[in-house]
């Protein structure tokens, strides 16, 4: 069952839930995966002209609206629906959110992305406590670099270089591994209010020298963000060079639909 939804729009989210519930009934599980990112410094100086500019606030707000407010919007609306259900084995529902390792290890240019993902991490425990008396659990996954469709368009040498930065196993994560952790968070009734990294022990550095090693490998209008793991807005993806792990998670879906 597919429902196209813009998570920044109340009416769109309401319509998506209504369509889904009409077909399969009130959901007991919500997995939030809608998200995007960009790579812009807080303030920067043009290398050619010396002109100084700051992060455009509309672009900062866009990332926060999708990644943070959009996630909360879907949580709140889904939880309200779950509260109408009778408990099964002492539970009404479970919610899994997608943050990113950038919530803790944000790189240069990731102020908006890290702020939005840090917000998802920060609200997990209070929301879990809010919903505890209603028998609804809430957890969040912080993925590292995953081999999802948005990254599969990258040249193989780029993907191998990214995977090699992971301590063990030295490869990209697989979607099935994200799904496995999400399933455990849903299945395990004692799993609640937790934020869990899923990253092969990677810790993101201040910056990445990928642009110096692979300056011409990542080109074309179909590319997501440079060496990106979850993508950036389509208008920002044309003819950009590989600049490192920005943003740092690929389990999100480019676009704005919640999974339920």
Image (spheres, rainbow, N blue to C red):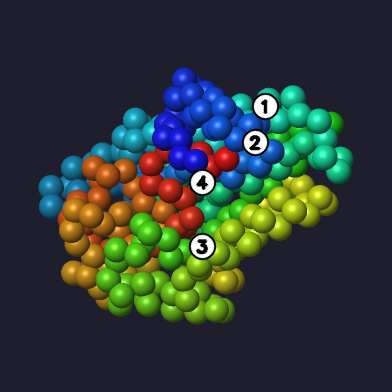
| Front-most of residues 24 and 93 | 24
Disc 2 and disc 1 in contact, CB within 8 angstroms: yes
Residue 43: x and y in percent read: 33, 43
Mark 2 or mark 3, whichever is nearer to me: 2
Residue 37: x and y in percent read: 39, 46
Residue 175's disc is 3
Residue 182 appears in the rendering:
yes
| Front-most of residues 205 and 50 | 205
Disc 3 and disc 1 in contact, CB within 8 angstroms: no
Helix, strand or loop at mark 1 = helix
**Displayed quadrant of residue 244:** bottom left
- Residue named by callout 4: 33
For the residues marked 4 and 1, what is the alpha-carbon distance in whole angstroms? 19 Å
For the residues marked 2 and 3, what is the alpha-carbon distance in whole angstroms? 22 Å
Residue 206 appears in the rendering:
no
Residue 84: x and y in percent read: 74, 25
């Amino acid at each position: 069952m597919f429902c196209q939804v813009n998570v920044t729009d109340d009416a769109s989210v309401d319509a998506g839930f209504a369509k889904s519930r009409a077909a399969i009934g009130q959901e007991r599980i919500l997995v939030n995966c809608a998200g995007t990112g960009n790579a812009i410094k807080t303030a920067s100086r043009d290398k050619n002209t010396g002109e100084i500019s700051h992060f455009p606030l509309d672009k900062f707000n866009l990332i926060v609206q999708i990644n943070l407010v959009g996630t909360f919007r879907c949580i709140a609306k889904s939880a309200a629906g779950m509260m109408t259900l009778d408990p099964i084995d002492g539970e009404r529902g479970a919610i899994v959110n997608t943050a990113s390792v950038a919530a803790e290890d944000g790189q240069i240019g990731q102020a908006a992305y890290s702020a939005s993902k840090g917000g998802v991490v920060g609200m997990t425990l209070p929301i879990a406590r809010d919903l505890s008396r209603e028998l609804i659990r809430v957890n969040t996954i912080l993925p590292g670099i995953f081999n999802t469709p948005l990254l599969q368009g990258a040249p193989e040498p780029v993907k191998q270089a990214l995977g090699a930065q992971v301590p063990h196993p030295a490869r990209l994560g697989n979607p099935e591994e994200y799904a496995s952790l999400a399933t455990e968070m849903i299945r395990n009734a004692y799993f609640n209010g937790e934020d869990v990294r899923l990253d092969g022990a990677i810790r993101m550095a201040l910056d990445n020298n990928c642009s110096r090693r692979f300056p011409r490998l990542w080109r074309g209008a179909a590319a997501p963000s440079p060496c990106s793991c979850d993508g950036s807005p389509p208008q920002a993806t044309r003819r950009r060079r590989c600049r490192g792990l920005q943003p740092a998670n690929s389990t999100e879906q480019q676009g704005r639909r919640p999974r339920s």
